Amino acid sequence: MLSGEVYYPSEEVIKNANVKNWDELNERAVKDYEGFWEEMAKELHWFEKWQKVLDDSDKPFYKWFTGAKTNIVYNCLDRHVKTFRRNKLALIWEGEDGQLRTMSYFALHREVCKFANVLKSMGVEKGDRVTIYMGRIPEIVIAMLAAARIGAIHSVVYGGFSVESLAERIEDSNSKVLITADGAFQRGKIVPLKQIADEALQRCGTVEHVLVVKRTDQEINMESGRDLWYHELMNLPIATQNCALEIMDAEDPLFILYTSGTTGKPKAILHTHGGYMVGVYTTLKFVFDIKEEDRYWCAADPGWITGHSYIVYGPLLNGTTSFMYEGAPNFPYPNRWWQMIEKYGINILYTAPTAIRGLMRFGESWVKRHDLSSLRLLGSVGEPINPEAWKWYYRVVGNEKCPIMDTWWQTETGMFMITPMPCVPLKPGSGSRPFPGIQMDILDEDGNPVKPNEEGYLVIKTPWPAMLRTVYKDPERYVNQYWSKYPGYYMTGDSARRDEDGYYWIIGRVDDVIKVSGYRLGTAEIESALVSHPAVAEAAAIGLPHEVKGNAIYTYVILKNGYEKSTALIEELRKHVAHEVGPIAKPESIEFVDSLPKTRSGKIMRRVLKARALGEDPGNISTMED
Ligand code: PRX
């Protein structure tokens, strides 16, 4: 018997699940870890087989499926169009304005090939970086796959980021081509993507061509010679639907994705064609129990890792039908999501606790007016889910028959790491145990495993196929950030507990990362945006608990001489952060202060600010300057 509050799967769920016995699968994976992943890899297509499943001769620069040749796009598209799946829907898309588009595997393959030819005609070659900055529209998927098809490395920048974030990411990745849209619909308004991109391009000089998808149709600036319309390019004779696929080495880069870390600038996490493909394919199939007839909806944004792995690559690798929705969950009314689940007969819904908490506030009557009986599985990701939200999701949305897959993972891990499967007993708030075969632990400061239920640092002890390979252009940072605190172990940056049943409970980040509504932001990004305003001398940002967002950003600002404290200035500074980083980074509050707590070496002690704000004891402050 398991301790605490436990939700056991029904016999029906177990009978129909892809994995019926978790312990058996885990035993198999532990006994022969490489053999397990090799077996999974064999379900996909390779142009040449690997010599080695795992090469650990140069730790921590692990390699997977060395010597193998593949291309993830072949397995996402080409493989399926040779079968009955050519006519199956790959994508069902609904715009915020109600517009509906569908695309079969055949159609998606065609559009990807056409756009790949367009990219080639712009001089994009294997290994080149291409930045993609768009809303949630089918073209973001087409752009990512087209780049990968010809061996280019995509770098998607979330459409909610703004000028400085975009400029910095374009510059760091040295992209020659930017793919964007005129705008994106969000809560009835237009996010002026092209206008933001124009401003960003004034700050960085690498981009030669901007390819623009028409979505919102407002007047935009098109710079002659540089900016080109997507729909016009796709109608040119060069955009044929035959496009040779680049045969990639398993270890060739597939994409980089910028994420926030402990200090300084966002870093580009690098993922590859081979191992990443095997990891996301397998985890989605087992955890979300993918069946041929499913309609699956991951409500994240393609611009984050959740979207890369489980909107774009995972579902297509599994040949499933994905649903994508462009806009806000409560637009025009709080029943929008439930209405679409009913309308399209969605079977699997994967979202974030913040969305659940947000929709929960409107009350269950909005959910209950719709028939959600098509749902058989639910999922959660991005931050710890509080038991109250878990139970609401389970009872009201899942009608007490849909297991909730609370998946813990990161941009860096590429795939689910701690996760249940439908056959696993659930405890609300816990993602249960590591994926079969993966060894994790919780350590104290000195590297000793902590006792059950004690808090410590969460580490991963086994390499896994979808692991990041490095920080792009900065291998040193890769080693220092992830592998140096406890040599040989991957440091997640999270703290956690493990109960007597071996279930993991994530507590939160232990570094300078703030998860706001599940989005990952660094204190440094927010602070440098504040300091870039002429009135600000110094700034500090911290995350404090928030009922819906999980965490909200609180900031402390020292003004330069000659600037007056005022509510107007607070508003101006909040807007400035939104303009530089993005609306998600807009501080909840800005407090003017005369000094900030610092160590003698000048580092801001955010923990002291946090303790003060929460009315808690700041702990050891012996390193604080006078
Ligand atoms: O703190 C953990 C939290 O999100 C962090 C990773 O953020 P990111 O790279 O943006 O990826 C998010 C989507 C995979 C983790 O270090 N986190 C993610 N999933 C969970 C979670 N915290 C608790 N429970 C989860 N299920």
Image: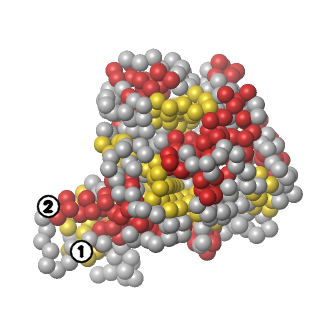
Residue 481 in the figure: left or right of residue 533 = right
Task: Please say if 365 is above or below 79.
Answer: above
Q: Which residue is located at x 80 percent, y 68 percent? A: 57
Secondary structure under tag 2 reads helix
Q: Which residue is located at x 34 percent, y 53 percent? A: 220
Q: Which residue is located at x 42 percent, y 35 percent? A: 95
Kindly identify which residue carries mark 1.
534
Residue 36 in view (yes/no): no
Out of 625 and 469, give the one closest to the viewer. 469
Q: Residue 296: which quarter of the image?
A: top right
Q: Residue 469: which quarter of the image?
A: bottom right
Report x, y in % for residue 207: 49, 67
Task: Please say if 291 is above or below 221.
Answer: above
Report x, y in % for residue 124: 62, 62
* Residue 95's disc number: none
Q: Which residue is located at x 36 percent, y 44 percent? A: 217
Dot 2 crowding, Cα within 10 Å, few <14, some 14–19, many 20+: few
Residue 6 in the figure: left or right of residue 604 = right
Task: Please say if 174 is above or below 240.
Answer: below
Quadrant for the C terminus in the image: bottom left
Out of 148 and 229, give the one closest to the viewer. 229
Kindly identify which residue carries mark 2.
568
Out of 315 and 464, give the one closest to the viewer. 315
Secondary structure under tag 1 reads loop
Residue at disc 2, CB closer than 8 Å to ligand 1: no
Residue at mark 2 to residue at mark 1: CA–CA distance:
15 Å
Q: Residue 280: which quarter of the image?
A: top right
Identity, as a three-letter code, of the amino acid under mark 1 = Pro
Identity, as a three-letter code, of the amino acid under mark 2 = Ala
Dot 1 crowding, Cα within 10 Å, few <14, some 14–19, many 20+: few
Report x, y in % for residue 617: 33, 62
Task: Tell me which numbered mark, 2 or 1, is placed earlier along the sequence.
Answer: 1
